[in-house]
Image: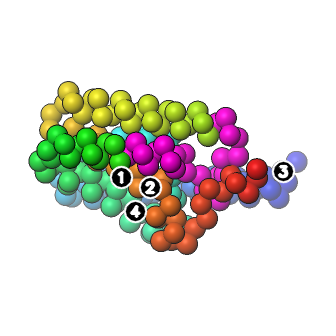
């Protein structure tokens, strides 16, 4: 028998699935129009891998989520065209590592990370992925190197309290359960 809570969880899951598919299709359509499809796919993949461990901010509405996604993905794509001095890349990577060490994984009210062991494992995986991204950035062409480092700083800021405060959302939701 399905309880009211089970039904609510199922509805939430279906809504998230629908939003993500719709968001992805819009993102890819715009990237085709802007002739940056391949770079958009790379940026999307880099962010998806990091967010799998770091979690991070989630907007309340489809449109605000779409805007944040566009800023993250297209910000990485277009900024990767710039020439970054090696020292700048190191500074961005260090800032990202600090943000991840302080704030990752960043949970949400809908998905609090109450298990402290799981939070620690996710933090270790996030920091490990960040180090790997930086190391990979040393051995790739400039555009991909920039995308790797930029994805770190963009997701780093998605885990810190800034977006939560701007959007008036609760932060460190797991603390309510400890």
Residue at left 53%, top 38%? 123
Instruction: Give the number of the disc on residue 154.
Output: 1
Residue 108 falls inside the magenta stretch: yes
Query: Which residue in the structure is indicated by mark 2?
Result: 158
What's the distance in space between the residues labelled 2 and 3, CA to CA?
A: 35 Å
Give the x, y percent position of residue 5.
80, 56
Residue at left 61%, top 40%? 119
Mark 1 or mark 3: whose residue is earlier in sequence: 3
The stretch of residues the image draws in magenta is: 96-118
56 left or right of 25?
right
Which sits in the foreground, 101 or 165? 101
What's the distance in space between the residues labelled 4 and 1, CA to CA?
A: 10 Å
Residue at left 64%, top 36%? 118
Query: Which residue in the structure is indicated by mark 4?
Result: 68
- Mark 3 Cα within 10 Å, few/some/many (few <14, many 20+)? few
Give the x, y percent position of residue 155.
40, 50
Instruction: Give the number of the disc on residue 2.
Output: 3
Mark 4 or mark 1: whose residue is earlier in sequence: 4
């Amino acid at each position: 028998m399905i309880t009211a809570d089970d039904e609510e969880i199922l509805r939430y899951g279906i809504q998230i699935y629908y939003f993500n598919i719709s968001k992805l299709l819009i993102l890819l359509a715009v990237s085709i129009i802007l002739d940056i499809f391949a770079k958009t796919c790379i940026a999307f993949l880099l962010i998806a891998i990091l967010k799998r461990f770091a979690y991070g901010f989630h907007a309340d509405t489809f449109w605000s989520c779409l805007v944040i996604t566009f800023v993250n993905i297209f910000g990485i794509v277009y900024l990767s065209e710039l020439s970054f001095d090696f020292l700048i890349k190191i500074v961005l990577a260090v800032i990202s590592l600090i943000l991840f060490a302080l704030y990752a994984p960043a949970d949400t009210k809908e998905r609090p990370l109450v298990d402290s062991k799981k939070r620690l494992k996710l933090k270790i995986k996030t920091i490990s992925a960040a180090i790997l991204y930086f190391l990979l950035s040393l051995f790739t062409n400039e555009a991909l190197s920039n995308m790797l480092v930029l994805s770190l700083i963009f997701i780093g800021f998605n885990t810190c309290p800034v977006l939560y405060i701007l959007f008036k959302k609760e932060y460190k939701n797991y603390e309510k359960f400890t």
